[in-house]
Amino acid sequence: MNAAQRLDATFAALADPTRRAILARLSLGEASVSELARPFAISQPAISKHLKVLEEAGLISRGREAQKRPCRLVGKPLADISEWLEAYRRHWEGNFQRLDALLDELKAQEPQAGAERPEGGSL
């Protein structure tokens, strides 16, 4: 999978609120499938499908400890998204800085209020 495909898979996985909630739970530490399923009003097979999407996107890993299959958060795909977004943040920050400079320049060129009105004159 190339970088663009990995980003696509990560964004697709993050598009679902249940998967985001699962990731939020895993940010606290590893958990079993049944622990992850507990807060949701969906079946364990449905949770397993969500976990498969997260695993295929590289956002989680699943281990094997006897009968348990603990799930763990994997940070690399989230770091890749952060890096991708950072380029856009720098772009927009540069645009806002140029806009601020232009506004400062325009303010400096404005005549002082009332400076060009003749005395006693009305508008």
Image (spheres, rainbow, N blue to C red):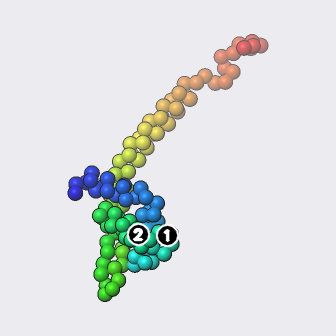
Mark 1 or mark 2, which is nearer the start of the sequence?
1
Q: Looking at the picture, which amino acid does disc 1 mark?
A: Phe
Question: In this view of the protein, which residue sits in the foreground, 72 or 39?
Answer: 39
Kindly indicate the quadrant of the structure image that contains residue 72. Answer: bottom left
Q: CA distance from mark 2 to mark 1?
A: 9 Å
Q: At which x and y percent is residue 16?
A: 43, 58
Which residue does the image show at 30% across and 78% down from the upper left?
63
Q: Which mark is residue 47?
A: 2
| CB atoms of marks 2 and 1 within 8 Å | yes
Query: Closest to the observer: 25 or 32?
Result: 32
Furthest-bottom residue in this view? 66
Hey, what amino acid is under mark 2? Ile
Residue under label 1, please give it. Answer: 40
**Residue 28, placed above or below residue 3:** below
Give percent across and percent down for residue 60. Answer: 34, 69
Classify residue 62 by image quadrant: bottom left
Q: Residue at x 36, y 78 (%)?
A: 70
Height in image: 46 above or below 8? below
- 122 w.r.t. 47: above or below: above
Can I make out residue 76 in this image? Answer: no
